[in-house]
Image (spheres, rainbow, N blue to C red):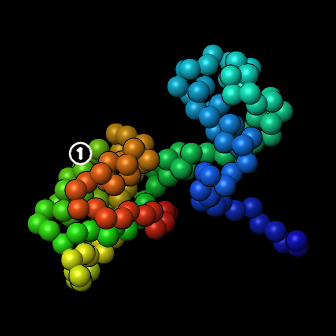
């Protein structure tokens, strides 16, 4: 292709080739100190060193790519007292800074809400915060809309 540009994409893990998944796991093992050397980590993951070196600079967990960014989340919330407040408290508890909140009028017992947060001071990685937000009673759906 002419004028092909390098870009970034969000891709669900289940469609990635096994070598890329293992590369991400090797990087995580090294970061957490579960393996002392690259050689040890790739052997444990049954990944060749050449495959690791081929992909290591090109794959990152979502939370690493979203660190020190503004992330916009979209929610489908049950129309019950305190649901939005619980979502905001969960963000605040992990030192997230809410920049904007937009909530639609509830229809058929649910309301759409869009919240933009700054991730620079989060006390947990973004993925962990998203997991906590999904567990908030009354959150029917949560998706990452975008990041800046």
Q: Quadrant of the N terminus?
A: bottom right
* Image point (80%, 36%), residue name: 51
* Image point (65%, 60%), residue name: 8
Pick the residue in front: 25 or 118.
25
Instruction: Indicate left or right for 9 with 145 as reference.
Output: right
Relative to 76, is 60 above or below?
above
Q: How many marks?
A: 1
Q: Quadrant of residue 70?
A: bottom left
Instruction: Indicate left or right for 51 with 63 as reference.
Output: right
Instruction: Indicate left or right for 24 with 50 as reference.
Output: left
* Image point (65%, 31%), residue name: 26
Name the residue at the left extreme. Answer: 81
Pick the residue in front: 13 or 71.
13
Relative to 142, is 61 above or below?
above
Q: Residues within 10 Å of mark 1 (few under 14, many from 20)?
A: few
Pick the residue in front: 92 or 76.
76
Residue 122, percent across and down? 36, 44
Residue 67, percent across and down? 48, 48
Pick the residue in front: 68 or 114.
114
Residue 58, percent across and down? 71, 47
The answer, for residue 57, to whether it is visible in the render is: no
Mark 1 residue element? helix
Q: Quadrant of residue 56?
A: top right
The answer, for residue 144, to whether it is visible in the render is: yes
According to the picture, the residue beneath numbered tag 1 turns out to be 93
* Image point (22%, 56%), residue name: 137
Relative to 138, is 30 above or below?
above
Residue 77, percent across and down? 26, 68
């Amino acid at each position: 292709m002419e004028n092909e540009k390098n870009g970034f994409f969000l891709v669900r893990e289940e469609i990635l080739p096994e070598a890329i998944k293992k590369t991400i796991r090797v990087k995580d093992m090294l970061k957490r100190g579960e393996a002392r050397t690259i050689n040890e980590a790739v052997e444990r993951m049954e990944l060749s060193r050449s495959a690791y070196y081929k992909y290591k600079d090109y794959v990152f967990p979502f939370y690493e790519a979203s660190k020190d960014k503004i992330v916009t989340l979209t929610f489908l919330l049950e129309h019950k007292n305190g649901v939005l407040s619980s979502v905001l408290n969960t963000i605040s508890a992990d030192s997230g800074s809410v920049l904007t909140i937009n909530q639609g009028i509830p229809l058929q017992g649910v309301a759409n809400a869009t919240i933009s947060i700054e991730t620079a001071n989060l006390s947990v990685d973004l993925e962990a915060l998203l997991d906590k937000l999904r567990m908030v009673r009354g959150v029917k759906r949560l998706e990452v809309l975008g990041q800046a």
